[in-house]
Image: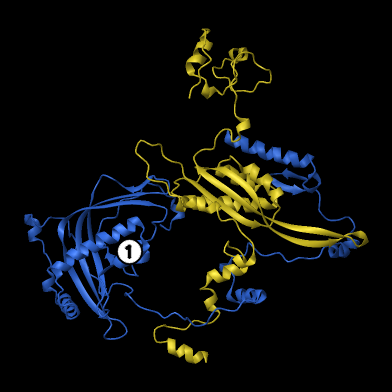
Amino acid sequence: MQAVLRCARSTVLASIPDSWSNLVALPALCKQVHMSSGLAAWSGHNTPMRWPNYNKTIFPPQELTEERRLAYVCHMKTNIKYSPWKMWYIACLVRGLSVDEALKQLSFVLKKGATAVKDTIQEAQEMAVAKHNVEFKSNLWVAESFVGKGHVVKGVRRHARGRVGKVEYFHCHYFVRLEEGTPPDHYYYHNRPKLLVSAELEELGRLEGIFQCRRPLPLLQLRPASLVSPQCIQDWHDGREFDDTGTVA
Amino acid sequence: MANMNGTFKSIELFKSISTGFLSSSLKTTLVASQAVRHTTNKHYAPKWKQLRKWKVVKVELPKFDENVDDLSPEQIRSRMKEKGLQPPRPWIERSLYLSCTGGVFEPYVPPEGDGKVSAMTKSGAKQKIEFVEKKSKSMMAVRKIRSFDEDFEPRDFVESAQEIYINAHNCLVSKNKLKIREYVTERAYPEIRHNIHDKTIHWKFIQSLEPPRMVHARCTDVITKENVFSQITVRFHTQQILAIYDRFGRLMHGSEILAKDVLEYVVFEKHLSNQYGAWRLHEKIIPDWMPPPEPSLKTFRLADTNIQ
């Protein structure tokens, strides 16, 4: 019966493919089998889909006067066989590092999740150069790095006296965003430098004091150096009366 | 500064683990830049190892890291059997329809030095100008086209060809997937849409420096004698503006203000035996003597490309 059908259709087609070789030509169906893509609707699991969509936003052409917009690339690795709470440590380590430094550090982190994170960052770097018009692959830094809980399989174990225990096998998703440029000096807001306009500055001989002070300071407001007008700093340094009320926008 | 930060962070991480709750699980030292473990995770009493193993009911975890492309057909078959999925149909239900040919038959070979000198100058006039009327095969093809289209005139055709060219490029720029198929054959479709995703393209047709000229015509039949396709090569010498911006709005290629002189040999195809066949852009012939295109503004690593 199949032979007859084959003869009928053989006029146009050069050769009738073998039944099983058709499998290779139907990736969509096969991918559903392995639940490796987000299109596995029948399995009842939802892999994250929104993070890679950030790569699809197209910005309008920039004006000549505008500063050159920095490229970014978002990448993720879903359902890594590792606990999300353990993976958090690795994600935190990598935050705010340049790409080269991050990869170097991850090569020597003795944790199972480090290999997955390293692969993700390497893939993101390659994507940035190939598809997102990033010229230098080292000119990237880890802007965002975080973890999400993935698929959980529930198992069972026995305890003494016939008691039952729950065993959970966790998977996690790892998300990373690489941005073009050099990493900032301080990634976290709470680590930012705070200005102290005090007598200690004169001892150190520094115009803009950028170090932390634990003593409360009278009168003067604690503000980052960038928000104090240069004229105010100059006046204070010269010993003149300085106007501390103004703030540079 | 950033380097220091990184090393400090990793050292902090090690410290927090070596002294904290997880210290027993990670007792390692760096000996001659290689990590060495001094503790093992093996239980001190191996006698009850089997029973300890039976305490936990083995659960088969789904293989998320498996790539379908890495599996052989036999492995795919066994996986589908496990899931209880039927194999795909061994024949193809949908019939095949050939709406265009796969390439250019008997392509036109443009003469060297074409477009370098204007025909108005003395040297240009002396230059050997090939007329289509002298080409017998092309004229036979034109006659065959006339047998299907009575009103076919090369002079009128080249004007409409330029319009098709402009419309096709406008659809490319506006990324109109449906409309472009009216102006472009199925063979040219993937080529015209290649590498334009995530980019903003500004294209403008300024003027035609020389009137478009038909330089080549051929007709062939595919599979049966009655199924006739015809291809006409038209020479365009035009001025165009092209500026390509990447995803972030930064200029990647070309310029918004500088116009370029473009000399092109474009092949148009029509399915003559089809009542609803239309002339569509099929291919562009790029001769060997054509100077290379403008290099991109970016630099590349040679190791990443296949240049030897």
Chain appearing in yellow on the rendered image: A
Q: Residue furthest top?
A: A240
- Quadrant showing the N terminus of chain B: top right
Q: Please tell me which residue is depicted at 68% across the width and 65% down the height of the picture.
A: B62
Residue A218, visible in the rendered structure: yes
- Quadrant showing the C terminus of chain B: bottom left
Q: Residue furthest left?
A: B122
Q: Nearer the viewer, residue A126 or B155?
A: B155
User: Is B29 positioned to the left or the right of B241 in the image?
Assistant: right
Residue A85 position in % (x across, y down):
71, 48
Q: Amino acid at mark 1?
A: Ile
Chain appearing in blue on the rendered image: B
Q: Quadrant of residue A157?
A: bottom right
Q: Compared to B298, does B282 lie above or below?
A: below
Residue A26 position in % (x across, y down):
52, 72
Q: Nearer the viewer, residue B146 or A130?
A: B146
Tell me which chain the residue with mark 1 is part of: B
Residue A135 position in % (x across, y down):
44, 46
Q: How is the image coloured?
A: by chain
User: Is A98 positioned to the left or the right of B201 in the image?
Assistant: right
User: Is B212 positioned to the left or the right of B89 in the image?
Assistant: left
Q: Nearer the viewer, residue B8 or B248?
A: B248
Determine which residue is flagged by label 1.
B180
